[in-house]
Image: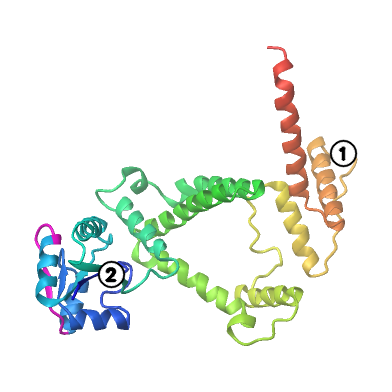
């Protein structure tokens, strides 16, 4: 009867011992070999299974164990032990009938598992012995990078380049993770972590989507948006509909956002009309604000419109450059 070697692969991102029922059955029923002690070996032993740590090449001990027991389990390490699997595959191919190699997943990475890796890597980089540049940063020194990365992600989205979008959003995530890691070094009464960031986000999403999490009636998209805004106002207890607007955003987008917020409550305030003694800059500002108001009334996005026209003009300039005098 052909023996069997079960290569048991588990997620290193889950708590040790969190295995499927099939995995627990196989480790309890057969000898288990592994390359190193770990939290998982401790958990398996505590469940009454036999675990042997192999010092050195594993192929020989596994073949010997198969000859004695018929079935043996190799408890793979965090990387999946690809080298051992390859060596076993070659050996069993050269000697057919020796044993069958079976791959079994005892646990899988949950969605978002690589976020844990990102947090772990950033902790290493921002800890003593890590990257001196990252350890020297502050929230203020990083603020410009966060803005830059957001703009680069915006460019990728505007271009419809999904590969670039994935990369640029990763750079935005890097900023979030680094800010959270630096916050762990703040004085105790100001300290927070990435878990606080994620926890606050989860709580907010649950609160503001009662049609998903609390059995409220979904209604139309307009009703869902109105519900979101109503819940947000109750949470923030702001004095003005303009509170919470990012005043550091580009002036054109800022003007559109302020007018949009006023429109939410049905407030219509005419743009300023400069007096006869107004300086040229004040006149220009008032004219630009009037154009933004007209664009909103027409259902147009002034920021997107100006960007589109500017990029088209930039292409014209590039085309004309070769003939420009030097």
Q: Is residue 9 visible?
A: no
Q: Residue at x 11, y 61 (%)?
A: 60
Q: Residue at x 41, y 62 (%)?
A: 115
Residue 277's disc is: 1
Give the quarter of the image for residue 67: bottom left
Q: Main secondary structure of the magenta part?
A: loop
Judging by the rendered image, the residue that carries numbered circle 2 is 102
Residue sitting farthest toward the bottom: 215
Estimate how packed mark 1 is, as few (under 14), some (14 to 19) or many (20 or more) residues with alpha carbons within 10 Å: few
Q: Position of residue 318 (x, y in %)?
A: 70, 26
**Where is the N terminus found, in terms of image quarters?**
bottom left
Q: Residue at x 25, y 56 (%)?
A: 86
Residue sitting farthest toward the top: 326
Residue 212 falls within the magenta-colored stretch: no
Foreground mark, 2 or 1, reads 2
Viewed as shown, does residue 252 lie left or right of 237? right
Reply above or below: 130 against 222: above
Per the rendered image, the range of residues in magenta is 48-59
Of 244 and 66, the residue lying toward us:
66
Q: Is residue 323 visible?
A: yes
Viewed as shown, does residue 88 lie left or right of 319? left
Of 230 and 11, the residue lying toward us:
11
Q: Position of residue 184 (x, y in %)?
A: 36, 61
Q: Position of residue 74 (x, y in %)?
A: 20, 69
Residue 52 falls within the magenta-colored stretch: yes
Q: Position of residue 80 (x, y in %)?
A: 28, 62
């Amino acid at each position: 009867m052909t023996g069997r070697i079960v290569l048991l692969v588990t997620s290193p991102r889950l708590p040790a011992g969190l295995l499927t029922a099939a995995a627990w059955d196989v480790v309890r029923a057969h000898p288990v070999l592994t390359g190193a002690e770990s939290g998982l070996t401790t958990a398996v032993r505590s469940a009454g299974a036999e675990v042997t740590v192999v010092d050195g090449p594993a192929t020989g001990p596994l073949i010997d164990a198969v000859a004695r027991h018929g079935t043996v389990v190799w408890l793979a390490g965090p990387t999946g032990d690809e080298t051992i699997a390859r060596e076993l595959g070659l050996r069993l191919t050269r000697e057919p009938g020796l044993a069958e190699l079976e791959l079994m997943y005892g646990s899988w990475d949950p969605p978002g598992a690589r976020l844990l890796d990102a947090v772990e890597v950033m902790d290493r980089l921002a800890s003593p012995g890590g990257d001196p540049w990252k350890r020297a940063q502050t929230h203020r020194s990083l603020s410009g990078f966060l803005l830059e990365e957001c703009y680069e992600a915006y460019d990728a989205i505007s271009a419809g380049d999904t590969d670039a979008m994935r990369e640029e959003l990763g750079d935005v995530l890097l900023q979030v993770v680094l800010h959270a890691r630096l916050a762990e070094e703040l004085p105790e009464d100001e300290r927070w972590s990435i878990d606080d960031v994620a926890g606050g986000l989860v709580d907010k999403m649950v609160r503001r989507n009662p049609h998903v999490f609390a059995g409220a009636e979904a209604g139309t998209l307009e009703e869902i948006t109105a519900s979101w805004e109503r819940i947000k106002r109750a949470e923030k207890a702001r004095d003005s509909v303009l509170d919470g607007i990012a005043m550091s955003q580009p002036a054109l987008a800022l003007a559109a956002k302020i007018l949009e917020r006023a429109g939410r409550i049905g407030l219509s305030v005419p743009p300023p009309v400069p007096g006869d003694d107004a300086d040229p800059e004040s006149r220009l500002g008032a004219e630009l604000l009037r154009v933004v108001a007209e664009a909103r009334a027409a259902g147009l996005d002034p920021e997107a419109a100006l960007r589109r026209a500017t990029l088209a003009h930039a292409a014209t300039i590039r085309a004309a450059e070769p003939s420009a005098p030097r």
